[in-house]
Image (tube, rainbow, N blue to C red):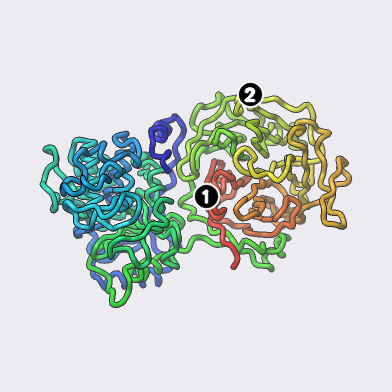
């Protein structure tokens, strides 16, 4: 985790790559755009259940989905003492400091910013621990300071335990005050609150209640508590985090910081809890950088990507990225009786999550059969797609997007019939253009690669277009369709300098028209053997749907030779693969009557499943309605089964879809679909559900 906060990150954030577009997102102005629960895809009865429970502690609240206000209760303008929700505002100030370079890394020693850190009391000097405290410790409740917000004692060596404290965050506030040499209230209004539309009528930050009013002549603020705000201001801060630190077209917080703040650092997971707060359930597995989270599933019916601020009297800013949901609530405490704090909170947040379940799709046997698809997967129950409003779109006017993960940790892709990303712009529309993608799915940066030997012109079937890419030992290989300039046949090109110059094969695949290379991990890591595997519809056309998919392979060191490629020819009596150089010996690995067209395959290593995206035009629909499916298999030759299928998605799936290996989570359950819907580089998050 250290590296993401260093100078390299901050330098990378200034690279001249395009940032994710905010054009289709809804944003508040003076007021919020509104939607009914039905329009927002929410269950009104569940919302009412959450609201009514919140009102057992009176107060105010609001529910925002997709940037639109769906429900409110109480006076939206009244100011509440948010108590420890202030800590999450403090985390926001830390993110600003990282973006500004005032803080180089959260793992910097705190004493380097604040020479008098931890003193008073003088007894802390005797521990020898003060020089070990980092900003990370202060932001994760692992510095060791006791609870009160004044000058408290150190209870343990930094990083060895977790203890809920106001003193630790207050020391962090002083570190940032000294780094900027200015009042943090002024800084936050300038850099965050005012851009978000939050005024002094919406939010005020009281003077320090536990320590002298000033430090080095500068107003001293608290992070432990101290902010008073209305739920409108709270929801705007929540939306800033939901959108990855971006507000309209401005990146206010580094996206990497938002991800880190909302997740549990590995350093916390196994720590013991010191003190009464956070004992039931143990807090460390669900605490981030001054934000609480549900990473360990402590709240059963709340998605694990949910995170929230939490203060005395149950002031809460809830953010659930997978549901595109922000909720703000303040007032008096929820009734506890014999409940733990988490149990009391769950009664509020679980109905909210249940009202806003992300789009689910699980193929039923009869549905799969009706579409001519294989039976449902025995391993994967389905995929829950993030709301359509969360889709990131770039490179408008371009499509295709085969993508691979190279040895330099970047991804390389190819576009068609457009000009690609914002810069550098090609002089004219290209049938085949190239681009580089850097960073994570929710904060990537992209730039075109202008390559005279790789790019080309020609509309539709008359132009070369990439249909598959793979990187092996630092060499990019690109499979290209329309080799005969009439929409048929395919060929191969390769580049040893990251897509700047290309060498083209002097031969073609005459029998197949859409070869897509199977992608594994970074630079082909995790491949099962020394071969490259490609799949294609069993037709020389890239535009007509075939009845089945065929599989080919070639040794890695010979894949540029046409005679090295051999077809999968079925299984022998022992269940072993047969291979043949003869096209006439080929055997299908997947059959979908008139349903095999544009495809891509990636190996999901943690799940040990190959995932295939498949788009086809339905023969039953003369208008060419597009069907989009995801299938899985334990081996490239099958048996393939159905994970997801739709002929009416909630957005245009486009000409092709891909599941990049780089954008799969460590457990293989979170994926990101890259697709050309709306003739764009479109990215949508999906959560895989495993069968019980």
- Total count of labels: 2
In this orientation, does residue 86 appear?
no
Q: Secondary structure at mark 2?
A: loop
- Which quarter of the rendered picture does the C terminus lie within? bottom right
- Which quarter of the rendered picture does the N terminus lie within? top left
Residue 53 on image: x %, y %? 31, 72
Q: Residues within 10 Å of mark 2 (few under 14, many from 20)?
A: some
Residue 487 on image: x %, y %? 74, 37
Q: Secondary structure at mark 1?
A: strand
Q: Residue at x 55, y 55 (%)?
A: 669
Quarter of the rendering containing residue 492: top right
In this orientation, does residue 501 appear?
yes
Which badge, 1 or 2, comes first in the chain's sequence?
Answer: 2
Q: Nearer the viewer, residue 91 or 131?
A: 131
> Seen in the image, is 35 located left or right of residue 506?
left
415 vs 67: above or below: above
Q: Residues within 10 Å of mark 1 (few under 14, many from 20)?
A: many
152 vs 559: above or below: below
Mark 1 and mark 2: span between their CA atoms?
31 Å
Query: Disc number at residue 684?
Result: 1
Location of mark 2 (residue): 501
Residue 52 on image: x %, y %? 31, 72
């Amino acid at each position: 985790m250290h590296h993401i906060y260093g100078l390299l990150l901050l330098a990378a954030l200034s690279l001249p790559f395009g940032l994710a577009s905010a054009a289709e997102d809804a944003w508040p102005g003076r007021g919020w755009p509104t939607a009914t629960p039905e329009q927002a895809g929410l269950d009104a009865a569940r919302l009412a259940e959450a609201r009514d429970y919140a009102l057992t502690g009176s107060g105010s609240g609001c529910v925002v989905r997709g940037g639109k206000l769906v429900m409110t209760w109480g006076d939206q303008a009244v100011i509440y003492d948010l108590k420890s929700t202030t800590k999450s505002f403090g985390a926001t100030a830390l993110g600003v400091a990282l973006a500004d370079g005032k803080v180089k890394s959260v793992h910097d020693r705190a004493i380097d910013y604040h020479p008098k850190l931890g003193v008073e009391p003088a007894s802390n000097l005797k521990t020898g621990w003060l020089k070990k405290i980092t900003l990370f410790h202060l932001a994760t409740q692992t510095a060791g300071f006791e609870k009160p917000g004044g000058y408290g004692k150190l209870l343990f060596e930094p990083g060895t335990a977790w203890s809920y404290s106001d003193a630790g965050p207050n020391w962090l506030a002083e570190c940032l005050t000294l780094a900027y040499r200015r009042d943090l209230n002024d800084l936050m209004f300038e850099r965050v609150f005012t851009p978000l539309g939050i005024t002094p009528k919406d939010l005020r930050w009281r003077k320090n209640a536990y320590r002298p009013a000033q430090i080095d002549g500068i107003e001293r603020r608290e992070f432990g508590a101290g902010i008073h705000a209305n739920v409108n201001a709270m929801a705007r801060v929540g939306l800033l985090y939901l959108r990855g630190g971006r507000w309209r077209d401005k990146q206010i917080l580094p996206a990497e910081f938002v991800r880190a703040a909302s997740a549990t650092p590995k350093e916390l997971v196994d720590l013991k809890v010191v003190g009464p707060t956070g004992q039931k359930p143990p807090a460390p597995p669900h605490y981030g950088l001054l934000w609480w989270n549900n990473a360990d599933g402590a709240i059963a019916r709340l998605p694990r990507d949910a995170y929230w601020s939490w203060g005395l009297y149950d002031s809460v800013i809830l953010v659930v990225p997978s549901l595109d949901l922000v909720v703000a609530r303040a007032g008096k405490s929820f009734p506890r009786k014999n409940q733990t704090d988490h149990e009391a909170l769950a009664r509020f947040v679980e109905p909210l999550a249940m009202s806003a379940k992300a789009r689910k799709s699980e193929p039923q046997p009869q549905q799969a059969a009706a579409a001519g698809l294989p039976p449902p997967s025995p391993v994967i129950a389905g995929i829950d797609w993030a709301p359509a409003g969360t889709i990131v779109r770039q490179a408008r006017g371009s499509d295709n997007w085969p993508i691979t993960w190279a040895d330099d940790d970047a991804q390389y892709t190819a576009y068609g019939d457009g000009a690609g990303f914002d810069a550098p712009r090609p002089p004219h529309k290209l049938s085949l253009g190239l681009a580089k993608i850097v960073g994570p799915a929710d904060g990537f940066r992209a730039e075109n690669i202008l390559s005279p030997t790789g790019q080309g012109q020609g509309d539709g079937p008359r132009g070369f277009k990439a249909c598959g890419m793979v990187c092996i030992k630092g060499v990019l290989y690109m499979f290209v369709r329309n080799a005969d300039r009439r929409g048929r046949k395919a060929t191969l090109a390769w580049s040893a300098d990251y897509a700047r110059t290309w060498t083209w094969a002097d031969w073609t695949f005459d029998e197949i028209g859409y070869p897509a290379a199977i992608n594994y991990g970074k630079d082909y890591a995790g491949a099962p053997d020394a071969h490259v595997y490609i799949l294609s519809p069993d037709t020389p056309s890239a535009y007509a749907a075939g009845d089945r998919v065929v599989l080919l392979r070639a040794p890695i060191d010979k894949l540029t030779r046409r005679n090295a490629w051999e077809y999968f020819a079925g299984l022998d009596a022992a269940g072993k693969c047969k291979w043949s150089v003869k096209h006439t010996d080929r055997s299908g690995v997947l059959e979908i009557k008139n349903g095999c067209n544009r495809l891509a395959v990636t190996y999901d290593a943690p799940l040990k499943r190959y995932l295939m995206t498949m788009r086809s035009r339905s023969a039953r629909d003369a208008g060419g309605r597009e069907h989009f499916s995801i299938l899985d298999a334990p081996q490239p030759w099958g048996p393939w089964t159905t994970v997801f299928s739709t002929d009416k998605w909630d957005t245009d799936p486009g000409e092709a879809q891909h599941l990049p290996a780089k954008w799969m989570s460590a457990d293989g359950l979170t994926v990101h679909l890259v697709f050309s819907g709306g003739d764009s580089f479109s990215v949508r998050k999906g959560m895989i559900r495993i069968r019980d």
